[in-house]
């Protein structure tokens, strides 16, 4: 049997709100929605993103700091224009991380604190 990634799932205290952020950021389509679960998918393929209720969600800290919730995963989002897409993501509710690791990459946090990176090809 072949295996492949079925989806990514982000825990959040408000699945509909976080799904709305990523739907707007990525241009994905909503498949179904409940108060505790929302499923999106990319228009060009079936790999979905899911957002599930975690009432006690603690946002990760990045870069890692002693005593903070560690980042165990993050999303990398390929963009053509790093400055324009950073500005658009912030207008949608993301926040720009103070520490930036290198040129061609921007680390942000979604409205519920999950880190994600915008990056240009070759970065």
Image: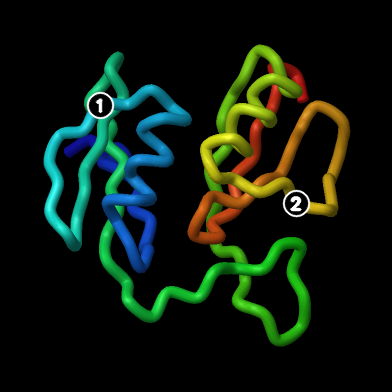
Kindly state the secondary structure of the residue where label 2 is placed.
loop
* Residue 72 point in image, percent of width and height: 55, 63
User: Is 56 rendered above or below residue 21?
Assistant: below
Residue 21: x, y in percent? 42, 41
Quadrant in the rendering for residue 15: bottom left
Horizontal arrangement in the rendering, residue 87 relative to residue 6 (left or right): right
Q: Residues within 10 Å of mark 1 (few under 14, many from 20)?
A: some
- Residue at the spot x=49%, y=59% of the render? 112
Indicate whether 37 appears above or below 83: below
Q: Are marks 1 and 2 in contact (CB under 8 Å)?
A: no
Q: Residue furthest bottom?
A: 67
Residue 121, how many percent across, how many down? 69, 17
- For the point 54% across and 50% down, which residue is it? 110
Identify which residue, 104 or 85, lies in the foreground. Answer: 85
**For residue 116, side relative to residue 119 (left or right):** left
Assess disc 2: are there few (<14), some (14-19) or many (≥20) residues with their C-alpha within 10 Å of its C-alpha. some
For marks 1 and 2, give the CA distance.
Answer: 27 Å
Q: Which mark is residue 97?
A: 2
For residue 29, the mark is: 1
Q: Is residue 116 left or right of residue 100?
A: left
Image quadrant for the C terminus?
Answer: top right
N-terminal label among 1 and 2 = 1
């Amino acid at each position: 049997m072949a295996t492949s990634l079925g989806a990514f799932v982000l825990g959040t205290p408000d699945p509909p709100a976080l799904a709305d952020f990523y739907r707007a950021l990525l241009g994905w389509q909503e498949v179904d929605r409940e108060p505790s679960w929302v499923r999106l998918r990319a228009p060009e393929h079936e790999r979905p993103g899911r957002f599930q209720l975690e009432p006690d969600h603690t946002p990760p800290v990045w870069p890692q700091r002693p005593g903070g919730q560690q980042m165990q995963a993050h999303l990398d989002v390929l963009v053509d224009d790093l400055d324009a897409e950073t500005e658009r993501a912030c207008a949608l509710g993301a926040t720009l991380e103070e520490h930036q690791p290198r040129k061609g990459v921007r680390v942000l946090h979604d409205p519920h604190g999950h880190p994600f990176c915008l990056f240009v090809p070759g970065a």
